Image: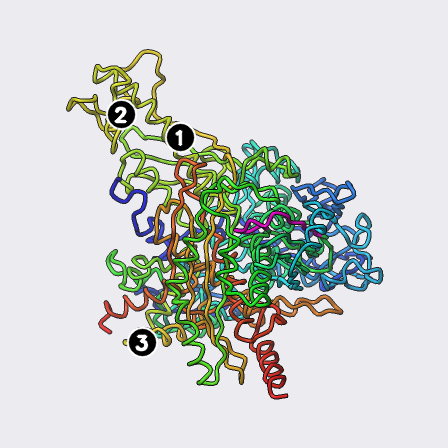
Amino acid sequence: MAENGIGARLARKEDPRFLVGKGNYVDDINRHGQAYAAFVRSPHAHANIRSVDISAAAAAPGVLAVYTGEDIAADNVGPLICGWAITSKDGSPMNMPPHTVLAQGKVTYVGDHVAMVVADTQAQARDAAELVNVDYEELPAVVSTGDADSASAAQIHEVAANNTCFDWELGDRADVDAAFEGAAHVTTLELVNNRLVPNAMEPRAAVGDYDRATDSLTLYTTSQNPHVARLVLSAFFQIAPEHKLRVVAPDVGGGFGSKIYVYSEETACVWAARKVNRPVKWTAERSESFLSDAHGRDHVTKVDLAMDGDGKFLAMRCSTKANLGGYMSLFSSAVPTYMYATLLAGQYTTPKVYAEVKAVFTNTTPVDAYRGAGRPEATYVLERVVEAAAREMGMDPAELRRKNLIQPDQFPYETPVIHTYDCGDYGASLDKAMEIADYAGFQGRRAQSEANGKLRGIGFSNYIEACGIAPSAAVGALGGGVGLWEAAQVRFNPTGNVTVFTGTHAHGQGHETTFAQVVSDQLGVPVENIEIVHGDTDKGPFGMGTYGSRSIAVGGAAIVKAGEKIIAKGRKIAAHILEAAEEDIEFTEGNFTVAGTDKAMNIGEVAFAAYVPHNYPEGVEPGLDETSFYDPLNFSFPSGTHICELEIDPDTGVVEIVNYTAVDDFGTVINPMIVEGQVHGGIVQGVGQALIESTAYDPESGQLLTGSFMDYTMPRADDVPSFNVDTTVTASPLNPLGVKGCGEAGAIAAPAAVMNALTDALGTEAIDMPATPERVWRVAQSRQAQAAE
Amino acid sequence: MPTVSMTVNGKSVSKDVEDRTLLVQFLRQDLGLTGTHVGCDTSQCGACVVHIDGRSVKSCTMLAAQCDGSDVTTIEGLATNGELHPMQQAFMDNHGLQCGFCTPGMVMSAVDLVKNHPNADEATIRAELEGNICRCTGYHNIVKAVQQAAKAMGG
């Protein structure tokens, strides 16, 4: 292994610039002659627009232009799209309503985009935006997920009767129902998966820039996938042909899914830059982020689990209603379907699974992928019902799980819900987690808590996720509109250092370090001589970006494939110069050696020879610069066991997590320090969902009540503990690095672990996320009252 | 427009600003010191924390004019002669940052934290960082970083 190669706990190459204030985020970018945009947003959840009077705004100081939906329509910009087609049970296609960049005749959520003001300064743009006079005809708002499709609900979109986008199913209902007939025990739960606001710390921002000389546009934007953004802006929004449009996503301050999508504001800025012939900048205020960044989750679900008398799972059936918000976002249809129901087998051998999902529109912010995207919802449903089943059956929850785990010798394992798992040893993670968490000592700790007047509980979450998204043909077969391969270019420069271009994008994940370790390990070049370049469509090949824990499993594999081409070419060059047969050349740790001799060339010398090809093999092109496009063979399947132990003060409802253990199988780990950091952050987002993060809308008006950090409870340092994080390793046989992906695991596993611990402590399943102190206190008080009777 | 004068990272600066200019806008837009970030509009997130006369302050919560005559240190002024401050080094050593957006404010708050609580335990560190939100790290490694820096800073 190269020093600082695979497995090294290497400090990050990107850190120094961030630590001294030299990060380059979109709002740090200012172009010469830059103007500023401000958006007029709907104050109503549901309304018809009778008229928009822009005259006062247009006459305000510094204003260059005021645009409305009519201008968007006149230029044929958009509409915004959903890129994944879902077919309902009855064979009908999903009902995708129009989603214009600026509203045309109607608004469907508070914060919906009505007009755009462009002015010389940010303050002038914001001042003028307040002068745009919109005459609204208010309509009744549809807010609740559960009631959105009821006959009495207002109709939001003409194309979607009963506010239903699709009513989809996976599995054979009759077959699963029949399996329930023979069950010795059925456990049933009704669960709410609460809506979350992603809240990456950097608000979204955009700078659109028009170059008159080349008639081309550049968009600097907070994107997780700049190439995809360019494709969408070009092919679907008609902003400019792809070769006349450059998208740059520089340092991006967190994404968690919310920066996958191409939103109205970014689209409008790059469009307007050409209209006003000046750069146009917009930076979201946090209040705008709350209203307009795609939210996550928001499911209501009923689940039934059938078991035989020994606790062996026979079948599961699950009915979910998923809230899409006011419009369809880019991948919103895939999240509650193929990213969700396909994971409902979990780590278990459950032979029959049926899921039905009805997706509904409401007058709320659109919902799309948020860290985990469907898989946290699946894990929550499955792991809650398994824990509840153990309690009802009087079995230890670990033992019930163990009885049903897929065994290591059963791989590849075909589940009843599409996926074929590649490898895993779920029992190993479970065992290790139980040991670290001292599960055996729990009853003693519980008794001690009880003596102190506290309620103590412990809960498991055995999760599995489908990551490494995704084999293109499979995606296409399931309705996806894109291929999900990844590209990499490995370029040796003449002096022997290496520039690597990747189509993935890092916004906190540390790719500049992790990918450099992979390249260093493979090519024997020191990490400090390797630069990872991403985030600019003018640099390197087209790529699909970062989401779904895909960057190392797909993007990393592409880098390795390009590296293999480098080695293959280098071998030819070295053979020629060393006057040996190509098959006699060995490559190890950066050196091409003639087998059995001390004749060798370093890869840097080979690179120089490739660019100064004076003594060079016939028929070989100069240069040492290779590109690979890698389409994965399958998803990857990270898995693990998380165990949460917590204590409740029944007098206040305050929950303290006293011990949290995560044992994850991510396959090969490139940089353990970075992987642990990903797990920590994911767990806290999951703990936040379980205990404190509530997205509250007024049920009548549809106003977002939790629209700021004063109201939406972000986890802070004093809300969470430190964690015990460890791994087990089964290397994936399906990609050259043996990796699986680690970015989402914490957020997927944690909500179920926390809620299973909480319900264990409270002695009832009847509490929903977020289990705030108020909710916990109410349940604790009613349980104590019941006990006293 | 009033003229404001202050010392920023050891240099005297003097500019005419609109009355309503916030300190963070002055730093970012007038002085080009973009290391100080804006993550919210309610003075909650702490991404904009700087030191004013040695104390940590959310620079979105003060007008530039209020800082007339003050000595301001931003994240750009924390390292000396190209050498990272022990807090910056500790964040790097312990992977206390991921996307880097909250980091400048987090580091500036943490420096003040250690100054006020040189021997802070984990609970104190967590409580004192309550005004800085990080969405990436889960705080685990930030706490470790502050503990390491506290030792290095002589706590």
For the N terminus of chain A, give its image quadrant. Answer: top left
Please state the extent of the stretch shown in magenta in the rendering.
A345-357
Element type where label 3 sits in the image? loop
Task: Pinpoint the chain carrying mark 3.
Answer: B
Q: CA distance from mark 2 to mark 1?
A: 19 Å
Element type where label 1 sits in the image? helix
- Seen from the viewer's position, the closer of residues A573 and A374 is A374
Frontmost of labels 2 and 3 is: 3
Can residue A359 be spotted in the picture?
A: yes
Do the CB atoms of the residues marked 2 and 3 lie less than 8 Å apart?
Answer: no
Label 3 sits on residue:
B120
Where does residue A739 sit, x and y in percent of width and height? 42, 43
Do the CB atoms of the residues marked 1 and 3 lie less than 8 Å apart?
Answer: no
Residue type, mark 2 in image: Phe
Q: Please state if A784 lies on the left or on the right of A436 as rendered.
A: right
The picture quadrant where one finds residue A626 is: top left
Label 2 sits on residue:
A608
Mark 2 vs mark 3: tell me if same chain. no
Do the CB atoms of the residues marked 2 and 1 lie less than 8 Å apart?
Answer: no
Frontmost of labels 2 and 1 is: 1
Q: Please state if A656 lies on the left or on the right of A301 as rendered.
A: left
Residue type, mark 1 in image: Ala
Label 1 sits on residue:
A562
Task: Pinpoint the chain carrying mark 2.
Answer: A
Residue found at the very far bottom of the displayed protein: A788
Can residue B14 be spotted in the picture?
A: no
Q: Is residue A691 above or below residue A99?
A: below
Residue at 24%, 74% in the rendered image: B155
For the C terminus of chain A, give its image quadrant. Answer: bottom right
The first of marks 2 and 1 along the sequence is 1
